Amino acid sequence: MSFTRRQFLSGVAGLAVVGLGAGGASRYWLGRRHASSGHDYQLIAAPLDVELVAGHQTPAWAFGSSAPGTELRVRQGEWLRVRFINKLPVPTTIHWHGIRLPLEMDGVPYVSQLPVLPGEYFDYRFRVPDAGSYWYHPHLNSSEQLGRGLVGALIVEEREPTGFLHERTLSLKSWHVDEVGAFSDFSVPREAARGGTAGRLSTINGVPQAIIDLPAGQIVRVRILNLDNTVTYRLNLPGAQAQVYALDGNPVKPRPLGEEYWLGPGMRICLAIKAPAAGQEIALRNGPIRLGTLRSVANSDAPGEWPPALPANPIAEPDLANAEKLNFNFEWSGAVSVNLDNGAPPSLWQINGKAWDINDKTCADRPIARLQKGKSYIFELKNMTQYQHPIHLHGMSFKVIASDRKTIVPYFTDTYLLGKNERARVALVADNPGIWMFHCHVIDHMETGLMAAIEVS
Ligand code: C2O
Ligand code: CU
Ligand code: CU
């Protein structure tokens, strides 16, 4: 079965199509309503054939009419109400990465909700406290579900105009496909035991070597989202005038991008880029490899100005002097062969000596830490492995305060890329009650042990 754009549109009568995102990702926006009933988006997950390799179809799974899926937009402080309809052949959920929301809306199967079965729907409804670039994805059979394309951007607009007149969303994903567009394995044990199983076809908004037009001379807000299962992109834009305005969801004091920024799976960076003169191009690269091209096109507006820093999000400031310290050790435990014969995923990674088992629905009953609501904590994150891990926490944002590898200008985030053998410190106020997943966002690390639950009560 494959799902067409027309079927999608017929399901969302009343939605106004405001514009097309870069790379053809459609964007549907419904005027805001105030009641908390009804929904702003009807989001359908369904099989969708896409052409990633010219002349060949790839049997992707998509949210809406593209993979990556429909870009959702909402204003800070308002409700996001999504009726999610599962037209996939498998059960699934949606998790809202980086959004501080109530546990029932967090999309973790058997913790937040039961899986949404094929043919069923689920209404996600929550207020979004923080502006910034977020994303959504399933939290079930993740290597396959995200691997097949079930990822999408969620943009929370600031309450007041920010001074940016132009913006683009660039969702990065490297697909596990071969030369004829057929899927290859999303997770291979010998790769899962190392840096993770990488796809081989890089795309921006689902397009290999995408060309994104920018208005010449203007300052453009460019949101770059790493929606990939595995790859840490070593982002660089040689020759560009680019300033960093936000990391993951949260604003930072604007500063030059510099030579390279390592954007791990799940992470986002918001840049302001001054588009060069018409006809000129900027390469967006991963290390030395070009992912796509930003191309300046003529426009008649007066040259743009650099906007001021974005307003801070309302995240509680941890009380470092009175915070309790907790240690989290990330270790490799790996005997790859142990569980292979019974079909279970191998247990390769551990947090504080415990490996999460994605087939054991009771794991979350045994949280790795219990935090007291309202109290401040410092997490000491210790990577005892030879691979980097983008460490992500659900439900709350944390402040990165120190690292033994690099100078940290403290900032709030939901995902920290913990380098090989690095030790870092992050701090938070445990202000959201629930059982929150704490995991590596390299999906096959997460599925082979590198996940835990943290309880706040
Ligand atoms: Cu993107 Cu459990 O997270
Ligand atoms: Cu998350
Ligand atoms: Cu990892």
Image (tube, rainbow, N blue to C red):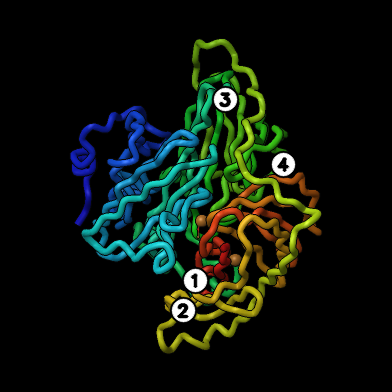
- CA gap between label 4 and label 1 equals 33 Å
Indicate the amino acid at tag 1.
Glu
Other-residue count near label 1 (Cα within 10 Å), few / some / many at <14 / 14–19 / ≥20: many
Q: Which residue is mark 2?
A: 345
Disc 3 secondary structure class: loop
Check residue 447 in the rendering and tell me which mark sits there, or answer none: 1
Residue 320's spot in the image, x, y percent? 77, 53
Residue sitting nearer the eye, 82 or 342: 82
Q: Is residue 220 above or below residue 140?
A: above
Q: Is residue 329 above or below residue 18?
A: below
Residue in view at x 59 percent, y 75 percent: 349
Residue in view at x 63 percent, y 64 percent: 371
Which of the two marks, 3 or 2, is nearer to us in this view? 3
Of callouts 4 and 3, the N-terminal one: 3
Residue in view at x 48 percent, y 28 percent: 213
Which of the two marks, 1 or 3, is nearer to us in this view? 3
